[in-house]
Amino acid sequence: MTEHEHRWTTDSTHTTSEGVVIYQRCRCGEHRVALAAPTLQARAAAPAGRGR
Ligand SMILES: [Zn+2]
């Protein structure tokens, strides 16, 4: 068995509430699942209604 540096290619990605789940696989057959943190998109938090 020759060890090699896996060359991961993204198979598919799924956006979940936990972040982005990335399915990757190598040509050797190895595969892995990575989880990328969700990009912090300023959730347009509606400013608390400031009653005049
Ligand atoms: Zn590999």
Image (tube, helix red, strand yellow):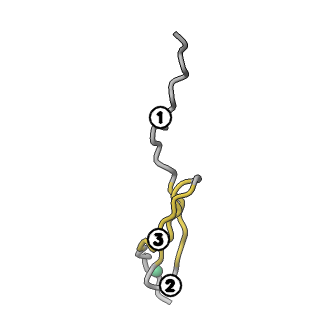
Mark 1 or 2: in front is 1
Q: Report, in whole angstroms, how far the alpha carbon at label 1 lies from the one at label 2.
A: 42 Å
Q: Report, in whole angstroms, how far the alpha carbon at label 3 lies from the one at label 2.
A: 15 Å
- Residue 26 picture location, percent across and down: 45, 79
- Residue 52 picture location, percent across and down: 51, 9
Q: Foreground residue, 49 or 28? A: 49
Q: Report, in whole angstroms, how far the alpha carbon at label 3 lies from the one at label 1.
A: 28 Å
Report whether the residue tagged 3 is closer than 8 Å to ligand 1: no
Residue tagged by mark 2?
29
CA neighbours of label 1 inside 10 A, class few (<14), some (14 to 19), many (20+): few
Mark 3 or 2: in front is 3
Q: Residue furthest front?
A: 52
Count all numbered tags in the image, as a single digit: 3
Residue at the image point whose x is 46% and y is 47% from the top: 39
Q: Foreground residue, 23 or 7? A: 23
- Residue 44 picture location, percent across and down: 47, 34
- Ranked by sequence position, the earlier of labels 1 and 2 is 2
Residue tagged by mark 1?
44
Residue at the image point whose x is 51% and y is 64% from the top: 14
Residue at the image point whose x is 45% and y is 74% from the top: 11
Quadrant in the picture for residue 4: bottom left
Task: Report helix, strand or loop for mark 1.
Answer: loop
Q: Residue furthest top?
A: 52
Label 3 amino acid?
Ser
Report whether the residue tagged 2 is closer than 8 Å to ligand 1: yes
Residue at the image point whose x is 51% and y is 70% from the top: 23
Disc on res. 22: none
Task: Report helix, strand or loop for mark 2.
Answer: loop
* CB within 8 Å, label 3 to label 2: no
Q: Is residue 8 left or right of residue 49?
A: left
Mark 3 or 1: in front is 1
Residue tagged by mark 3?
12
